[in-house]
Amino acid sequence: ATPTALMVGTGRGAKMGILIKNGEVLEAVNDVKTVVFDKTGTITVGKPEVTDVIGDAKQIIAVAAGLEESSEHPLATAILMYAKAQAIAATPVQDFQAIEGKGVQAQVNGQKAFVGNDKLLADVQISAELKTQMQTLQNEAKTVVFVGLNNQVIGLIAIQDAPKATSKAAIAALHVRGLKTVMLTGDNQRVAESIANQVGIDEVIADVLPADKADHIKHLQHSGAVAFVGDGINDAPALTTANVGIAMGSGTDIAIDAGGIVLIKNDLRDVDTALALSKKTFNRIK
Ligand code: ADP
Ligand code: MG
């Protein structure tokens, strides 16, 4: 009867767009105490849009678009779409380099240019006024990137990625189950907290470099089994380190491969459905 129950369970899941890869996943689900979420594309829609440009917008967007043309990051897509909408031509760049979790840099007319967060600034100074403007935007749940040229910050770009309509309900359902929820993100603390408050997430771990995400999962495992929900290339180590890796179906192939459970419909409420189904199936097999 054991393999039959497993087949019935995974078959029912498949019909609902929930792929459960094996029986071990079912067993692990039973012990989960904490559910950890990636932010971009998991809690949020994953289609960020430029909302504010502080400084000489034409110059800032031209330089930023030139740099972001070679990047595949969702923030890059937002900046390129904005440049196109404003009919601002991208400044040509040389020696492009992407720096994981920080931003991008290149040469523009022999000068070093960059777009990214404060981890990329090193010894470049920003004015008190710019810092205040940055914090105000971050408190509005907007991700702020600096645009730099010739060792100077020439301005800020604010980019907004709204929570999915179902994220709040999805988190609430997990709390009803007595689970703790955590957001783990490379984005800034203020932005992450603002989004976490909107959807009701318990705890925020922000400013995390992609390489460090798996270590944070290991730390959270001190208080019991952890499920991680993510969609990006960066998320693969966290997905495999977690006791249960849940990949969003809209995500990268790498994330989908790394997940023990795949949510095809890309609806965050399916995390709760997947947990319920796994528990039910597991109790039938054991
Ligand atoms: P997440 O946890 O949301 O996937 P990432 O690790 O991909 O975050 O990125 C973290 C931060 O690094 C971004 O919020 C941004 O500040 C900066 N960053 C990364 N890539 C880029 C890029 N191409 N352009 C500008 N900023 C970037
Ligand atoms: Mg990401």
Image: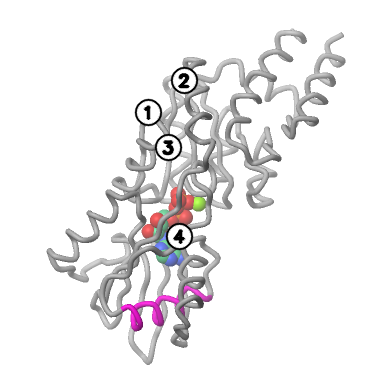
Q: Residue at x 36, y 31 (%)?
A: 203
Q: In the image, which is nearer the foreground, mark 4 or mark 2?
A: 2
Is 62 situated left or right of 277 in this image? left
Q: Which mark is residue 175?
A: 2
Alpha carbon distance from label 1 to label 4: 27 Å
Image mark count: 4
Which residue carries the number 4 mark? 100
Alpha carbon distance from label 4 to label 3: 19 Å
Q: In the image, which is nearer the foreground, mark 4 or mark 3?
A: 3
Which picture quadrant has residue 25?
top right
Which residue carries the number 1 mark? 202
Q: Amino acid at mark 1?
A: Asp
Q: Amino acid at mark 4?
A: Glu
Alpha carbon distance from label 2 to label 1: 9 Å
Q: Is mark 4 within 8 Å of ligand 1?
A: yes
Q: In the image, which is nearer the foreground, mark 1 or mark 4?
A: 1
Range shown magenta? 57-69
Decide: marks 2, 1 in contact (CB < 8 A)?
Answer: yes
Alpha carbon distance from label 4 to label 2: 33 Å
Q: Residue at x 64, y 24 (%)?
A: 273
Vertical relation: 233 (above or below) 223: below
Q: Farthest bottom residue? A: 109
Is 263 situated left or right of 44 in this image? right
Q: Indicate the position of residue 106 as horizontal and vertical percent values.
A: 42, 79
Decide: marks 3, 2 in contact (CB < 8 A)?
Answer: no
Q: Quadrant of ligand 1?
A: bottom left
Decide: marks 1, 4 in contact (CB < 8 A)?
Answer: no
Q: Amino acid at mark 3?
A: Met
